[in-house]
Amino acid sequence: QVQLVESGGGSVQAGGSLRLSCAASAYSVSRLSMGWFRQAPGKEREGVASIGRGGNVLYADSVKGRFTISKDNAENTMYLQMDNLKPEDTAMYSCAATTWSLTLTLNSARYGYWGQGTQVTVSS
């Protein structure tokens, strides 16, 4: 069973930055397809970014150019660097993973393992 634990959320002003971490256990991140998702109150879950086993990446249009997804195999951790944050980025952010080798996707149904989430709040 893959276990995922997020950290790094918090409150920032618009234009600020945060870096989220997703530490994996029981499986190497080098063998996982992983992604970040977010859900704001009253809204559906939205895919933010995904990273494949080989490090290829995919971003939602809403975060392209502002967010960067990466993995550190030595730390067995996935990251989401978020820059130039906007109030509309406010949400609960969760990381997800699958042991299947996926074509990059922001479809949450393709991921079987999830972390508990970390809150990001951006004020104007």
Image (cartoon, helix red, strand yellow):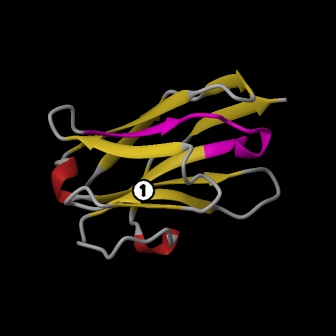
Residue 54 coordinates in the image, percent (x, y)? 19, 60
The residue furthest front is: 65
Side (left or right) of 11 relative to 20: right
Stretch of the chain drawn in magenta: 77-92
Residue 53: x, y in percent? 22, 60
Question: Which of the 4 image quarters holds residue 93?
Answer: top right
- For the question of whether residue 116 can be seen, the reply is no
The number of numbered badges drawn on the structure is: 1
Kind of residue indicated by mark 1: Gly
User: How busy is the neighbourhood of tag 1: few (under 14 within 10 Å), some, or many (20 plus)?
Assistant: many
Residue 12 point in image, percent of width and height? 70, 23
Does 22 appear in magenta?
Answer: no
Nearest the eye: 118 or 68: 68
* Residue pictured at 77% horizontal, 46% vertical: 88
Indicate yes or no whether the magenta region holds residue 82: yes
Residue position marked by numbered label 1 in the rendering = 35
- Decide which of 9, 57 is in the foreground and name it: 57
Q: Name the secondary structure under disc 1.
A: strand
Residue 43 in the image: above or below residue 87: below
Q: Is residue 3 above or below residue 49?
A: above
- Between residue 85 and residue 4, name the one nearer to us: 85
Q: Is residue 102 left or right of residue 66?
A: left
Q: Is residue 73 above or below residue 55?
A: above
